[in-house]
Amino acid sequence: MNKAFASPIRGALVLVTLLAACSSSPETGGAGGGPSAITEPTPAPEGSPWDTLDQWHFFTDAATQTPSASVIPYDVNAPLFSDYTAKRRFLWLPKGTKIGWQDTERWSFPVGAVLIKNFGYPIDARDPTKGIRLLETRLLVHESDPAGWVSHTYEWDAAQKTATIKVAGDTIDMTWIDEKGATRTNAYEVPNTNVCQECHGKTGKTSSLAGRTRQWNRDHDYGKGPENQIDHLVALGLLDVAPPPAAQRQTLIDPSGTGDVGERGRAYLDANCSHCHGVIGLAKGTALRLDYDHTDPIKGDSTDFGVCKSPASAGAGGTCGLSFDVVPGHADQSILVCRMETLTAKVTMPPVGHKLVHDEGVALMKAWIDAMPEHLCQ
């Protein structure tokens, strides 16, 4: 794996049910982010999230991200870029509930599910034993209709003891050492609650981004060596139907790996762009479809993923003085690349969720476009 491309630690997604309807806060067990005597999650009442992350009991030790007994860690094949943060993901399903399997579409999760992702920067990415500085933990709580999925963000204090709910967002000035030994800085933005909807969808239509077969179909070490993550869910009885064998499942390849550049480019776009640029999403009106299925160079329509397509709407300066989203064989003439490699407001893509340019992602997109059969658009 190209470590400069991938997050130093792969990411955190936990699903939790709302088992409690009481309005009083549960006993927290250990102090701050320390070990807790409670080993199972304690969901908050709908519409009344706990003040601190500890009160949910997702972890027996939140500061070290040690999951509770029934919480299942997992990874994704193609991570969403988040300013080079380290991320860890976990899964927890309420007792007796199951995931609704889909071959290619997003899985359906039961009411009570919570998606959780922990974000942080490594102290020194060259030495994982030095740990990470936790920044925030994001939750998507699947409440009853019409609310649907509801987002909550918990910000970690500097002492790494407590994560407290943050509604209005915040900025954290961070310094860390990257994989090459360079000192990096970032004014990291903890999003306000409304910003979450720009990627995950508006209230009542919010959904997970990576809860689907092509992201989950990979191995993870659960303590007994590598095991396919979906097969692990099957063994635990957490899927509503038996899925096809692993080799027959739709799968994204690692964008930072050494596989086919076309497949790596499609995987990157699916993970980083398709939640807006798809048949649903904030940018569906642009008719630029960047999900995995629409970017198929054989079965798909190349204009769907921008080939010789003039943008339907790009905002002030959003075309970079260029005419087409993608010009095959000419990344330097493609709007898609231009908008990825700038941080200029109203030009940069994605429009939210990052303060740094993803250099490795830009390089991949250039390689993906340059590898296309050369064609000048008119």
Image (tube, rainbow, N blue to C red):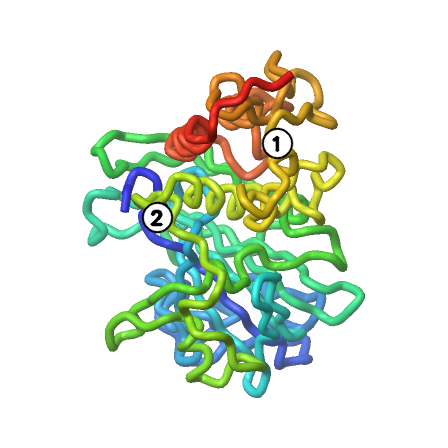
Residue at (57, 31) in percent of width and height: 349
Label 1 crowding class (10 Å Cα cut-off): few <14, some 14-19, many 20+?
many
Locate residue 208, reporting x and y percent.
60, 59
Position of 211 compared to 156: left or right? right
Locate residue 205, reporting x and y percent.
74, 57
Is any atom of residue 43 visible in this view?
yes
The quarter of the displayed image where residue 32 is located: bottom left
- Residue named by callout 1: 306
Locate residue 252, reporting x and y percent.
45, 54
Position of 184 compared to 76: left or right? left
Q: Residue furthest top?
A: 321
Compared with residue 64, is residue 301 higher up or lower down, i.e. above or below?
above
Instruction: Please say if the residues under marks 2 and 1 sit with CB atoms less than 8 Å apart.
Output: no
Position of 48 compared to 227: left or right? right
Compared with residue 299, is residue 104 higher up or lower down, i.e. above or below?
below
Q: Tell me the quadrant of the picture where the C terminus can be found.
A: top right
Question: Which numbered disc covers residue 133?
Answer: 2
Residue type for callout 2: Arg
SS assignment at label 1: loop
Residue at (27, 52) in percent of width and height: 131
User: Closer to the camera, 183 or 81?
Assistant: 81
Residue type for callout 1: Gly
Q: Residue furthest bottom?
A: 96
Whichever of callouts 2 and 1 sits on the residue coming sooner in the sequence is 2
User: Closer to the camera, 139 or 333?
Assistant: 333
Residue at (56, 18) in percent of width and height: 376
Comparing marks 2 and 1, which lies closer to the viewer? 1
